[in-house]
Amino acid sequence: MLACVALVLRVYAIDRLPPGLFGDEAVEGLDALDVLAGNWQIWFHAHLGREPLYVYLAALAYALFGVTPLATRLPALIAGLATIPAAFFLMREWASEIFSRERATRLAWLTAALLTISFWHVQMTRNAHRDTLLPLVQAVGYLLLWRACRTRDWRFYAGAGAVLGLAIYTYSPGRFVGVFVAVFVAGEFVVRALARLFRAQARATNILDWRGLIVAALLALIVMLPLGIYFAQNPAQFSRRFNSTSIFDQPAPVAAFATSVAGNLAQFVVPGMGYQSKHYNLPGKPVFDLLIAPWFLIGVVIALTRWRQSHYRFLLLWFIVMATPAFLTADMIPKGVRVLGVAPGVFIFPALAMLEFEIRNSKFKIWEFATRALMAVCLVGSAVWTTYDYFVAWANHPDVPLAFDADLAEAAEFMRQQPADAPIYISQEVYRPPTLMLLGEQVPTSRYVDRATRFKESDARTALIFGAQQPDALYVFIRDYAPPYDWLIRAAPNTAHVRNGEYFTAWRLGAPAPPQQLLNAEFNPFLRLVGVSRFAGEPRGVALHWQVSAPAPDRAEMDAALALLDARGAVVTQDKHRFAVPPLEWAIGDTYVEWYALEIPASATQFRAELTRGASVWQSPVIQFK
């Protein structure tokens, strides 16, 4: 039954929910394409740096199923499903020395059930994000560690060390796993030493088999060694992501820390105070809904009252240490992604409260029945709540499709259907967005800044590209990044409509209309002005015709300005904007028809164009309108 619920919540409608593919998901795929291209790395340094494990799993999914949104998300989906049985066996092992076998199993089922129906976990594991691997690594690693504690078998210690060593390859908070284990073990040594000192019965766990711990530590170090060597050679990469969000960069670090702690703790139980990101949550929804939150709080109190037992110290320390990455950052408070390392352990707290409530009311059948009925209502109600919130409330949130770049994914699918040699020009909001680069162009990260070949991008609202050898190019205008239709058919009178999608429109423009006035102004080393047209009728404005004479040496973009002058050379009106075709798209011989939508006063008899690139400024001569 539990497996069916887990599958339904994580697999149902996975082909359309989430829609599209969010840019943060797509960058994992771009790095995976690098792996498939033979660029194997221990650290993927683009996008503020990324751990490699998810990238390699995504590359495997691509090799098996092709480059699709579902294949990109498949490692997270499988990891999310696998975490549930791993959590069950971990909890049963963890509880085996403090409860009877029956009650330990009961606690394990409750923990697994709470994880299964958690909106937080469902949402995270349906997204392609490397942080979803961390709970699985911890669940398996800690399971082996507690098994080693109970059996004193060095093979379990070795397995625990090897698995937990993988944590640093999952997500940056995974580096705190080693900190947590080290602090816990050191604390247990201190507890045992104090107990002996005061001749009290030691309550430290059997984890303190120093020979087993050495084996575990050696295996963990061996597994971590490749990435450790990389960080030793590239120390800036180790802290690069943290440095961009650290509380220590704030004017008042202590106040920033207090705000972060309060906000990140509130997201667990306070309605409206949950993670606000539409990518990873129904904005404001807490980790535990109102049916589970009271159990969670009671469970925390129970653990605190039993802190003298090592099992509960382990549980409390797990939560504190693995929440610390979120506590130390000052952006986007709360940050649900950064506290995912507390899972699956955080679900033990409400399970513990339920089990304790059941034990206390087991003496009388009526009370036992009422207790179990209450627990069933909470679990079933929470499952229904999660189902509604994800598949109805979140799925129908009007901002979700565009938050997940559904427009780019739809356009990319259309572009992939075109002949492989068909030139395509694209107009959209962000230059070279990861989603379009992955699904449409399938360009590895290492080729992300290559000069464009088949696909070229521009802002068609202010300029159209006409390729020298590509009269039948396809133009894809995404959402609002299409030129005004009246200007489109004026600039390209042979325009033919191809298709409308939900978020894009596609055209073939043919040859451009010849300019009213031919020119040959070579005042810029890359572009020359070859024509101008002015229009007093709607839509009013001036069109400049540029031709590429040389490629730009780098990616620095350029600003363009047009000034209309009267007969004495005084400026009558002017306009300025970012040159609509980025330098990486320039190809020798291409013509760009650039549009300035401005009024043309009768006194404007001449004009001057200006191009600015970095510190370089080029002005055309003053040119008379004919």
Image (tube, rainbow, N blue to C red):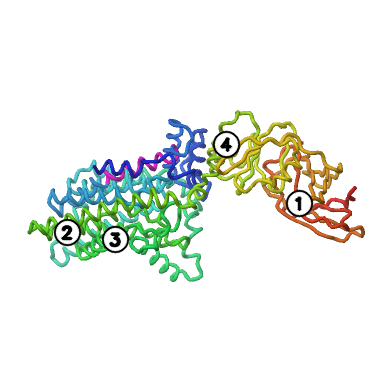
Counting from the top left corner in percent of width and height, residue 533 is at: 82, 46
Q: Kindly report the distance in space between the C-alpha atoms of the residues bearing marks 3 and 1.
A: 58 Å
Which circle's residue, 3 or 4, is located before the other in the chain? 3
Residue at the image position 84 percent from the left and 60 percent from the top: 572
Which circle's residue, 3 or 2, is located before the other in the chain? 3
Which circle's residue, 2 or 1, is located before the other in the chain? 2
Which mark's residue is nearer the viewer, 3 or 1? 1
At label 2, the amino acid type is Glu
At label 3, the amino acid type is Ala
Counting from the top left corner in percent of width and height, residue 184 is at: 28, 57
Q: Main secondary structure of the magenta part?
A: helix
**How would you rate the neighbour count of disc 2 (Cα within 10 Å): few for under 14, some for 14-19, many for 20 or more?**
some
Q: Quadrant of the N terminus?
A: top left
Residue 567 horizontal side relative to residue 349, left or right = right
The magenta segment:
71-86
In the rendering, which numbered label is found on residue 356?
Answer: 2
Residue 343 horizontal side relative to residue 279, left or right = left
Which circle's residue, 2 or 4, is located before the other in the chain? 2
In the rendering, which numbered label is found on residue 441?
Answer: 4
Which mark's residue is nearer the viewer, 2 or 1? 1
In terms of secondary structure, where does tag 4 sit? Answer: helix
In the rendering, which numbered label is found on residue 293?
Answer: 3
In terms of secondary structure, where does tag 3 sit? Answer: helix
Q: Kindly report the distance in space between the C-alpha atoms of the residues bearing marks 2 and 4.
A: 56 Å
275 or 527: nearer the eye? 275
